[in-house]
Image (tube, rainbow, N blue to C red):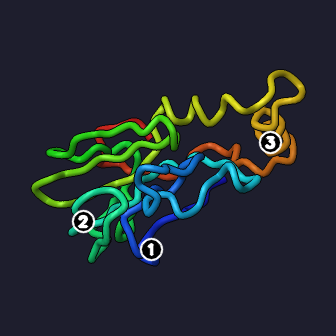
Amino acid sequence: MTYRYAGRFSAYSSRRANVFDDPYIPNSTPFNTDQAIVLGMPLYGRSFVATDRLGKPFTGVGNGSWEASVSDYKDLPRPGAKEYVLDRAVAKYSYDLTARTLISYDTPRSVEQKSSGDKSGNSSLIATAANALRHARCLERSANVLNYSISQYWN
């Protein structure tokens, strides 16, 4: 389950999956999860290029891992970028001052913070959703049928 509060449609570089608003940089949190029901943890980051910092205008979205502006979490932060944690908004981003590129994404810490609102045991919404998908056979359970014979990795 995922969502995006920011992207090429945004007027300002913003966070794409924050929980709370940021009163210090209001343009960076035009939408907030605490005003909604859905809570998600995207496994990717959204980039904004030619921006001076979070909450400022941008002119492009840049390259991504598989789509413009979308970078896989495993590829973040990019070399040369400095990471910033915003505890109040429960959000993280990286900013490369030289490239003027900002990327918003989640980390283990932000996922843990977001998950802290869930109940435990049989009342857990996260565990209930995972179990329902597993029992409904909505999750793929077949063996990998791909074969990359020249790969150095086990398939």
Residue 61 image offset from top left, x and y in percent: 32, 71
In the rendered image, the residue lying farthest to the front is: 24
Disc 3 to disc 1, C-alpha distance: 31 Å
Amino acid on which the number 3 mark rests in the picture: Ala
Work out whether residue 30 or residue 78 is closer to the camera in this orientation and state it.
30
Residue 107 image offset from top left, x and y in percent: 45, 37
- Residue at the spot of label 2: 51
- Residue 129's label in the rendered image is 3
Disc 2 to disc 3, C-alpha distance: 38 Å
> If you read the primary sequence from the N terminus, does the residue marked by circle 3 or circle 1 appear first?
1
* Mark 3 or 1: the one toward you: 1
- Residue at the spot of label 1: 10
Q: Secondary structure at mark 3?
A: helix
Amino acid on which the number 2 mark rests in the picture: Thr
Residue 154 image offset from top left, x and y in percent: 40, 36
Residue 60 image offset from top left, x and y in percent: 28, 75
Q: Secondary structure at mark 1?
A: loop
Q: Secondary structure at mark 2?
A: loop
Quarter of the image holding residue 5? Answer: bottom right
* Quadrant (top left, top right, bottom left, bottom right) of the C terminus: top left
Q: Residue at x 36, y 56 (%)?
A: 71
Amino acid on which the number 1 mark rests in the picture: Ser
In the rendered image, the residue lying farthest to the left is: 98
Q: Residue at x 47, y 43 (%)?
A: 91
